[in-house]
Image (cartoon, rainbow, N blue to C red):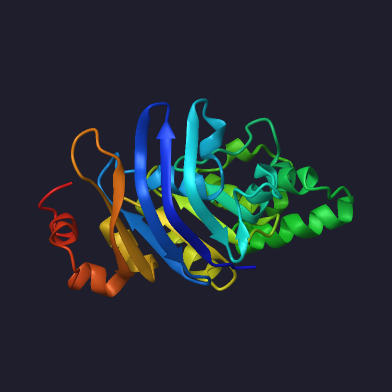
């Protein structure tokens, strides 16, 4: 687990609209990389290209290369399903399967990937819920609907579902934007714990959150209205927040725009 991502000159379009242009970014294993930038600058689009979620949208296309260690995730020898098993994703709003129990929410990906033994599934469900810091809260009610949990618990359930299949990378798209401050802190603590086993990329509008949880920060920006998003700079989080190389990064960090 925990692999290096290397994106080279990645471009993405929705129909005729180019969303991101020439994004080249290395994400190191066993680190948290935060992606920050104003709304509409392509942060979410970029991470969706990293696990091929982008291509489920009609008319969308991607160019460039994205390597997971030494494997081209857009290569002809690998399917989108395989990529999404290796590169899990947690979305902005908690999205447990509403008709499924807590247990079955976590087990869904396991079954999709060929695990059918009840004992093996139960062990994997417990392991994933423990890693997500949720086991003690739900172990006595695994048959209840996942949607019956609080918002913060639902998001941790979605994280448990994502890590149940033991991916190499965990992408998190604004995972705390719909949560209260207490739940947000719980998710941030969880992210810090999980980076020992996973390569983690988190998209966030919250500057304080990026500063708290990430080792590396990448700043995306727009050249102008209607223009595609670009990577302005990337570096150690402490440097990006205290001494960035580009004046546009400093302007965004200090709140002068965005």
When the figure is inspected, residue 210 is found, relative to residue 156, above or below; the finding is: below
- Would residue 22 appear left or right of 243 to someone viewing this image? right
Residue 152 in view in this figure: no
Name the quarter where the N terminus is drawn. Answer: bottom right
Q: Position of residue 126 (x, y in %)?
A: 73, 59
Residue at image x 49%, y 35%?
61
Residue most toward the left?
A: 256
Q: Position of residue 200 (x, y in %)?
A: 50, 62
Q: Position of residue 96 (x, y in %)?
A: 60, 39
When the figure is inspected, residue 225 is found, relative to residue 222, above or below; the finding is: above
- Would residue 105 appear left or right of 37 to someone viewing this image? right
Residue at image x 30%, y 44%?
229
The residue lying toward the viewer, choosing from 174 and 10, is 10
Residue at image x 55%, y 40%?
53
Q: Position of residue 94 (x, y in %)?
A: 51, 41
User: Which quarter of the figure has residue 241?
Assistant: bottom left
The residue lying toward the viewer, choosing from 79 and 87, is 79
**How many numbered circles are shown?**
0
């Amino acid at each position: 687990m925990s692999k290096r991502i290397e994106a080279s000159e990645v471009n993405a379009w929705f129909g005729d609209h180019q969303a991101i242009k020439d994004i080249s970014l290395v994400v190191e294993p066993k680190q948290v990389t935060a992606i920050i930038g104003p709304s509409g600058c392509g942060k979410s689009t970029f991470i969706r290209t990293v696990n091929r979620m982008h291509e489920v949208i009609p008319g969308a296309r991607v160019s460039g290369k994205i390597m997971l260690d030494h494997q081209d995730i857009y290569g002809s020898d690998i399917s989108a399903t395989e990529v999404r098993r290796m590169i899990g994703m947690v979305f902005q709003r908690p999205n447990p399967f509403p008709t499924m129990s807590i247990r079955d929410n976590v087990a869904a990906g396991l079954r999709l990937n060929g695990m059918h033994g009840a004992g093996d599934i139960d062990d994997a469900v417990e392991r994933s819920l423990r890693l997500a810091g949720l086991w003690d809260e739900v172990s006595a009610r695994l048959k209840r609907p996942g949607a019956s949990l609080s918002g913060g618990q639902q998001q941790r359930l979605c994280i448990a579902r994502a890590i149940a299949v033991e991916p190499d990378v965990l992408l998190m798209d604004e995972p705390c934007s719909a949560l209260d401050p207490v739940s947000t802190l719980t998710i941030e603590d969880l992210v810090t714990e999980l980076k020992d086993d996973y390569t983690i990329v988190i998209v966030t509008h919250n500057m304080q959150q990026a500063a708290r949880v990430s080792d590396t920060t990448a700043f995306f920006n727009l050249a102008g209205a209607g223009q595609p998003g670009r990577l302005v700079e990337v570096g150690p989080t402490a440097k990006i927040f205290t001494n960035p190389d580009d004046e546009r990064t400093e302007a965004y960090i200090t709140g002068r725009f965005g």
